[in-house]
Amino acid sequence: MSRRRCWSVVPVCAAAVLALSVLPPRPAPASPPTAAADPGCLARAKAGLTTASAVGDKSSLVGDEYDVRDYRLQLTLDPAAATYQGVVTISYVPRAPFAGEVVLDCAGPLVTGVTDGETALPFVQAGDALRITTAGKREPTVENVVVTFSNALPLRLREGLSLWYWDYPEDTDPIISSMSQPDAARTWWPCKDRSDDKARCQVEITAPADLVAVSNGSLVDEIDHGDGTLTRIWSESHPIATYLVSVALSAYDDFGSLCVTDAGSVPLRHWVHPDDVAAAQVDFAPLCDMIGVMEGLVGRYPFADEKYGHAAFLNMNSGAMEHQTVTSYGRNLIRGNNHYDWIMVHELAHQWFGDALTPRGWQDIWLNEGFATYAEALWEEHLHGMDPDGEDGYFTWIRTKRGSTDWIGETPVYDPFPILDQVVYDKGAWILHMLRGRMGDADFFALLADWTASARLHGVVDTGMFIDLASEHAGEDLTGFFTPWLEATTVPHLEFTALTTDGDAGAGTRLQVRLRDRSGVAFDNVYPVRVTTEAGEEWRALRLVGSETTRSFDFTTAVQSAALDPQGWVAWREVAATADPSRLLRSYPNPSFNGVVALVYLQQEAATLELEIFDAAGRRLHRRDVAAVGSSLLEREELWNGRDDEGRAVPSGVYWARLNGEASSSVLKFAIVR
C-alpha cells in the first residue's frame, strides 16, 4: 500500500489587499457512524470493573529491593467446589540495599506456607502484603521463594480469577477466567504486581480432564494423572507483566491455522464455546491479514515463536483484554459477521503496544490504549484508504474519536483519572494522528518501527522515552507539541483570517494569514492550510507556538480561497463556534496544609451540577449538588473542608474532584498534607 505525505512545508517569499473568504473546517461527527459499533464500549468495559482499584491509582506495595526473573505458577482448579490451590515459585535477584525481606502483593489468597525451595521461611500476611524473611542473602545472585496458597473462586466477578457459567442462570458449563488490569493479579496469586518488573512465567493448570486450560505462551506439556485430572503446562518465554498473565479454563472447542506473512509465520489458535465455532471462524478470518498489515507498519509480531489467538470469556462479555499471546475475548463479540473487527485489531495491536512494550506506570497507559486505538484507524485505512471526504476509511474512523466535547475539561491523557478513561483511548489516538500529520508518513512510520525495534522490544517504556525518540525522528524537540496535548484539558480555540495582496506574480498572488489561539494554553502545532488558486489547490504549513502568528505565502496565480486544516489533522475549535462545557479549572492551595481546598470551575449549564471527591483507591468520599446561577459562562468556586460525608478528616494524600453536568464531566487532581 502506497503512502503519501498529505501536506508539506513550502518555502515562503516576500510582500501588499483584498478580503478573502475563509472556508470553515470540516466538522468532526459527534458520534460514530451508525453502521459501526460504538468505539467507546471497549474502554467502558474495562473501566466498568467492579473493584475500586480499577478507577483509582492504587499502586503496588512492593519496592525496588529485588528484581523478579521467573514465575512458576501452579494452580489446581476445582470448578465443582469453586476453590483452587496454588504454588508460586518466584526466582529473583536482590538489589542493594537488600534487607533480607521479600514483600509480595497478596490481596486475596490465604498463604499457608513459604520456603526457599528447601527450608521454611518466616512470613507475615497482613492487609494486601505478604512479607517474607529470607535467609539473609544479599548477593546479586538468583534466589527463590516458594509460596503455597489457596482461595475460593468468586462467582461472576469481573476482576481477578472468577467462576462463570456460559448458561447463567442455569449455571451449567463452567468457565474459570482471569482479568487483572490494572492491579488485580494480586487478588488471585501472590506476586510483585508492578508493570515495570516483567519476568518469564510458566503457568501449570491442573483441572478436570474434560476441560481445556489455556494460558500465555506455548503449550509445552500435558500430564494425565489417571484420576480424571489433567495438567497443561504453558510457558511464556518472553518477559510478561503480572496484569497480562492469563488463565482460561472451560470445555472449549479450538481451531487454528498457520498465518504466513511477508515477515514469516505465526501460529494462530482460538478457544471458544462449542456453539460459537462457526461464528468465530468467520469473525477471526481477517486476523492473519491484520497481522500482516501491522507487521508492515510497525515490525515483526513480537511473539511469533509462540502463538496468537483468542480465548472466549465472560469477565467482559462485550469487551476484550490483551493477555499476552492469547487475548481474552468477550463471548458477545462473536457474531459471525465481523462486526467487531475493530476490537480484534485493537487487541492485536496491544501485543506490540502494551505487551511487548509495557508502560512503566499507569500514568503512561496512553502508550497502550492510544496506540491500540490508533491501530483501528490504520486498519480502516488498509481497507478503504485515507478517504478524507468520504464515508469510510482512515479519516472517517479517526473523526469518530473526537466526540462532541473534544475532551475539554476531562481527564488529561498523561496520569489520567480514572486510569482507563475513554480520553486515554481517543485523545491518545489523536495525538498520534496529529503527530503523523506533522511529521509526514515516512518519518512517522519509521518512528513506530523504531519504537517497536528489538532494542526496546519486551521492555518497559514511558512517555519521556517516546517523546525523545519522536524528537529524534522529527529532527526537532517535540516536547512543546506533546506536553499540552498530554497534560492540558482543552484544545486550541482559533481565529483564522486571511487577505490577498499583490505578489511577485501579480495581483492577488500573495496570501497573508493570521492565526490566533484563545485557549490560554501554549500549544505548539503545525496546521495545514489548503489554498485554492486559479491553477488549482496547494497546501502550506502554518506553525503556531503560543497565542498568535502572521505569515505570508506567494503563489504563481491569484488566490481564490483558503481553509485552515479542512481535513482535520489537528484537534481545534473556532472561537465563534465554541461553547465550552462546565468544567473544573484549578484548585488552591495545592497542596493544602489545613485540609481546606478551593475548587474553581466554569459554569456554562443552567442545570444543577454535581461535585464528587474521590481518594486514590477510587472511593467516593464526598458529594454535593452545586446550585446553578444563571446560564452564562462564569468562573465560580466551591470549598471542601477535607472531610468525608461522615465528618472524618481525610489523611494526607492525593485526591480527585469530579464535576458532573448534564452533558459534561471533568476531573482535577490535588493533594492534602496534614
Image (spheres, rainbow, N blue to C red):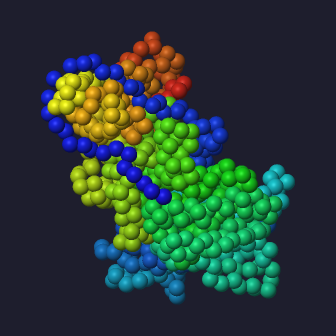
Which residue shows up at 27% across the image and 49% down it? Answer: 478
At x 52%, y 18%, the residue is 607
Q: Is residue 458 left or right of residue 522?
A: right
Q: Between residue 311 and residue 296, name the one nearer to us.
A: 296
Q: Would residue 182 appear left or right of 466 to someone viewing this image? A: right
Which of 146/212 is in front?
212
Farthest residue toward the top?
A: 630
Quarter holding the C terminus is top left
What residue is rendered at 35% in x and 59% in y? 447
Q: Is residue 33 visible?
A: yes
The answer to whether residue 354 is visible is: no
Which quadrant of the view contains residue 166?
bottom right
Residue 655 in the image, given as x and y percentages of width and height? 41, 41
Point out residue 445 in the picture as x, y percentages from the top left corner: 39, 58
Res. 223 image quadrant: bottom right
Left or right: 82, with 185 as reference point = right
Judge whether 285 appears above or below 17 on screen: below
Query: 5 above or below 600?
Result: below
Residue 24: x and y in percent read 40, 26
Compared with residue 128, is residue 568 higher up or lower down, i.e. above or below?
above
Task: Please give the name of the residue rendered at 50% of the width and 62% of the height, measured from the top-left corner.
Answer: 294
